[in-house]
Amino acid sequence: MAMGFHEVAFPLRLALGTSGGPVRRTDIVSLSNGRENRNSRWRDARRHYDAGSGVKSVADLYRVLEFFEARAGQLNGFRFRDPVDFQSCGPLGTVAASDQGIGVGDGVTAVFQLSKTYADAGGEMIRVIEKPVAGSVVLSVAGAAVPGADFGLDAATGKVTFVPGKIPAVGAEVRAGFRFDVPVRFDTDRIDIDLAQFQAGRIPSIPLVEIKP
């Protein structure tokens, strides 16, 4: 059986109770003079989660077991809703077409990749968004809202395509608002279920790891 990606979402109610977030890999070398050299081995962060903390009942356990089996363990990826970072604005904000810059028109380019920028006075990082939530994407060009009929969305890749006659003009900034999921897989081929331990308060570990293209 070949690996793949299933465009299905991990149960949202369980996802909202999980723990985890972005992980980076940095090499740090301490020098003899007390200084240090730091080098980032990864260009982008890779997110890790533990879905076990969202399991509160035997019914939840069975739902995870069912989902795990349907994915064949680690073999197939799936969508996961990060409980904190899941939309183009902050978690308590309202998605707006002005949230994120995704490109500048040249009069020819019709396809734009959704992305999210994390920035402050010290620097910035641009994250490609590959798994937007269908129906959540709104666009603006040069500050004007774009009707939904003027563009299409590939929810499996995060690319938006303007229809002929609506391609952004030269110099027109294209911005987007959206909700999104993280592409992940199970980071184990084994789920241990011990009902005696669970009822005593022990939560099973269900590790998930982000899939990078």
Image: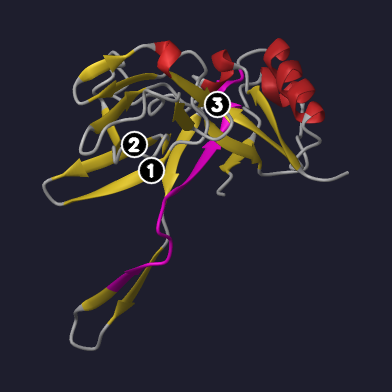
Where, by quadrant of the figure, is residue 128 drawn? top left
Rendered location of residue 138, percent (x, y): 36, 17
Question: Against 148, is 156 above or below?
Answer: below
- Image-based side of 210 in relation to 118, left or right: right
Q: Residues within 10 Å of mark 1 (few under 14, many from 20)?
A: few
Q: Are marks 1 and 2 in contact (CB under 8 Å)?
A: yes
Residue that numbered label 2 is attached to: 116
Q: Name the one closer to the observer, 39 or 89.
A: 89
- Image-based side of 183 in relation to 142, left or right: right
Taking the spot 24% from the left edge, 76% from the top edge, the residue there is 36
Taking the spot 77% from the left edge, 38% from the top edge, the residue there is 73
Marks 3 and 2, how far apart at CA: 16 Å
Q: Is residue 148 magenta?
A: no
Amino acid beneath label 1: Arg
| Sequence-earlier tag: 3 or 1 | 1
Label of residue 127 in the image: 1
Q: Name the one closer to the observer, 203 or 27.
A: 27
- Regarding residue 93, the answer to whether it shows in the image is no
Residue that numbered label 3 is attached to: 155
Q: Quarter of the image containing the N terminus?
A: top right
Q: Which residues are magenta?
A: 38-55
Amino acid beneath label 2: Lys
Where, by quadrant of the figure, is residue 9 drawn? top right
Rendered location of residue 209, percent (x, y): 58, 43
Amino acid beneath label 3: Ala
